[in-house]
Image (tube, helix red, strand yellow):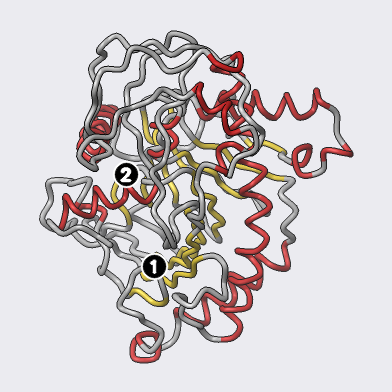
Amino acid sequence: MLKNFLTLTALCAIAVVDGSEYVHHSISSCSLQYGMPECEEKNATMITEPHKYFPAQIKRIVDAADAISPDAIDLPDNHSYPVIDISPWLNPSMSSDEDREQVVQQVLNEARSSGSFNIIGHGIDDALFNSLYASARIFFSMSMEQKMGYSSGNNRAGYVAYRNESVASVHKSGSSKEQKDLRELFSMSFPPNNDANVHGPPELHDAMSQYIERLQVVERAVKQILTAALSSAKDIDLPTTYLKDVEGNETGLLRASRYPSTPGFEDATKLLPHSDFGTITIIASSEEGLEEIREGRWYRVPMGIGELHVNVGETYTMWSNGLFKNNIHRVSKEAKKDRISFPYFTAQGKPTSSNPGISPICSNGEEPVFPRVSPNGHVKHYFSAITGKVES
């Protein structure tokens, strides 16, 4: 339960009718209690089906970027990729209020523009990264029969073979050749001793377990910074741990991902343009290959040694009422080397109880654009739209 829970009256309330999170009824106002701003609603046009809105939004932006050039380029020499040192938030006793505020403003600037940035000062040492990449390469070099011995039949746990997932089923490219993702995976949710997890080979299990534990500290810090950024931009006073607390018991999902080298194979689909469904994703990668849309065109994402990449997902776009931009990215079709990456999808592990989520966080007089939603609720709407089934 949140400390100072009543301060949440700053959130724009959305009526939930007949058990649906996506039915909108007109509400005269949110609240003016406890010094929090009133959020008037003037029968604004509500995006009632985000799982339909985001694919259409992404297609529109991608089509415009492809019209400039479908190929990604490096940032110009006079533009450096944003690399933000978050150590003032991990070591507050060693930093000043001004140091932490500078980090907040840097993150806010990137979250509201492209929805992504790299971080340093996260406290994870190179030795752990080396163990991650080495153990993953050994695992993925095993025979298919050996790897399938670690499959659970559930994509959130254990091994998932090539072309068993499909971003194209949501973000369609229009090409019949681009329907299955060219990557193989090994997934672990937090905590690592979770009964739903598959215990992989010892080296891989130990490295992923240590890493996912260390990521909890990084995740909390980044979400505290984003909470402060939201408070600053909306001119409201949110509890420091707000964006983490409202997730309830929804935990993170770590995936060891291998994208094979495919030089000259134009129809290869590593991962089509998309944005992540959840709150934020934190990525470690052994090789470059991630590409994203910045300022209307495709750019390569540089990954320096020891840097982690953070991108904003659709849930944060909705919770911020559109302030934070859902980052649109893909994995390069061509690569001279296999690419190993470790994306950590926060708040997308298997929950043990339902979470109704929250409505958009609004400034004084701002109208809510999106409905009440939780990270897993948003994913389930996608799943249902694709399969016609309701995920439990």
Secondary structure type for disc 2: strand
Quarter that holds the C terminus:
bottom left
Q: Is residue 271 above or below residue 275?
A: below
Instruction: Tell me: 322 left or right of 217.
Output: left
Q: Report the label total.
A: 2
Instruction: Tell me: 90 left or right of 68.
Output: right
Residue position for label 2: 274
Quarter that holds the N terminus:
top right
Q: Position of residue 261 (x, y in %)?
A: 38, 65
What residue do we see at 58% from left, 33% from top? 5
Q: Which mark is residue 208?
A: none
What residue do we see at 25% from left, 68% from top? 163
What residue do we see at 35% from left, 66% from top? 183
Q: Position of residue 109 (x, y in %)?
A: 56, 23
- Give the farthest residue toward the right: 94
Give whichever of discs 1 and 2 has the lower sequence position: 1
Mark 1–mark 2 Cα distance, whole angstroms, equals: 19 Å
Residue 314, by quadrant, is: top left
Disc 1 to disc 2: CB gap under 8 Å: no
Q: Is residue 51 above or below residue 384?
A: above
* Mark 1 residue type: Arg
Instruction: Tell me: 156 left or right of 273.
Output: right
Q: Position of residue 364 (x, y in %)?
A: 49, 10
Q: Position of residue 75 (x, y in %)?
A: 51, 32
Q: Which mark is residue 156?
A: 1
Crowdedness near tag 2: few (<14), some (14–19) or many (≥20) residues, C-alpha within 10 Å? many
Q: Nearer the viewer, mark 1 or mark 2?
A: 1
Q: Is residue 207 above or below residue 346?
A: below
* Mark 2 residue type: His
